[in-house]
Image (cartoon, rainbow, N blue to C red):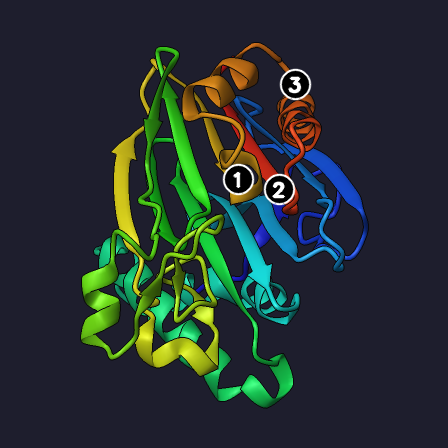
Amino acid sequence: MDRLCCFGASYSQLVGGRSSSSSGRGKNHNGLIKYGFSLIKGRANHPMEDYHVAKFVQIQEHELGLFAIYDGHLGDAVPSYLQKHLFSNILKEEEFWVDPNRSISKAYERTDQAILSHSPDLGRGGSTAVTAILINGQRLWVANVGDSRAVLSRGGQAIQMTTDHEPNTERGSIEHRGGFVSNMPGDVPRVNGQLAVSRAFGDKSLKSHLRSDPDVRDDNIDNNTDILILASDGLWKVVSNQEAVDIGRGIKDPMKAAKQLTAEALKRDSKDDISCVVVRFRW
């Protein structure tokens, strides 16, 4: 496969989450598709654990937009690993151009196996993931594991492109694998009383009860498509899909839109880290 070439970026597109906040913007080759991102540390007393990817690359005759949010827990080693390797692993799949769905699913699983095999170095933590691959500005492939979410706006209407993988909704799978779901008063449902998502990368101690296979969805980008928003649950816990779309559509600069969304979530006392990527189509 040809070497990846990046363009249209005004900030390093592989920034990970050690600083308290970061933001940036970029665009595709012809400037018709623009993106911006913003990451803010939440109020929890631990280092920043959210990472992102936002960039356009050229592979052979294809232009790919690569966008992702990786929301880590119990440390930042796993989301940092995903930031460096997940997209590369997807694009290395020989069938990617003929069967993106299968290739994305295989790469997610293989990446998780690699993380588990490196657990002495990466630690006991894990990460959710939501990834979006935009092919030639026309076809969008979205995948996710966990509760980081992608929302598309078409004609101003919010369309959730991902499925939140929550313990209560996947209780049957967890119990079939020998685990249990706790529902303690005042707390969210958790796998074995620990993890608030039913699918994740890493988490070796819980892996026998968790899944890491993604839900994958594709869609066409047409003239009615406005924006795409990817964000961690630090945003979605306090901002609805439609409200996020309304805020994003109302701000021309996608970086300013991403910053407004993360600032709004922080103002509403989101204790989690908050990360957001906004992609704007043909303003």
Q: Quadrant of residue 24?
A: top right
Residue at image x 73%, y 45%? Answer: 43
Please, what secondary structure does the residue beneath circle 1 have? Answer: strand
Q: Which residue is labeled 3 in the image?
A: 253
Residue at image x 59%, y 49%? Answer: 53
Q: Residues within 10 Å of mark 2 (few under 14, many from 20)?
A: many
Residue 159 shows in this picture: yes
Q: Is residue 22 above or below residue 80?
A: above
Tell me which amino acid carries mark 3: Asp
Q: Residues within 10 Å of mark 1 (few under 14, many from 20)?
A: many
Residue 93 shows in this picture: no
Tell me which amino acid carries mark 1: Ala
Q: Is residue 238 left or right of residue 50?
A: left
**Disc on res. 231:** 1
Query: Which is nearer the eye, 74 or 252?
Result: 74
Q: Position of residue 218 (x, y in %)?
A: 26, 40
Q: Are marks 1 and 2 in contact (CB under 8 Å)?
A: yes
Q: Quadrant of residue 269?
A: top right
Tell me which amino acid carries mark 2: Ser
Q: Position of residue 14 (x, y in %)?
A: 67, 54
Query: Is tag 1's residue or tag 2's residue first in the polypeptide sequence?
Result: 1
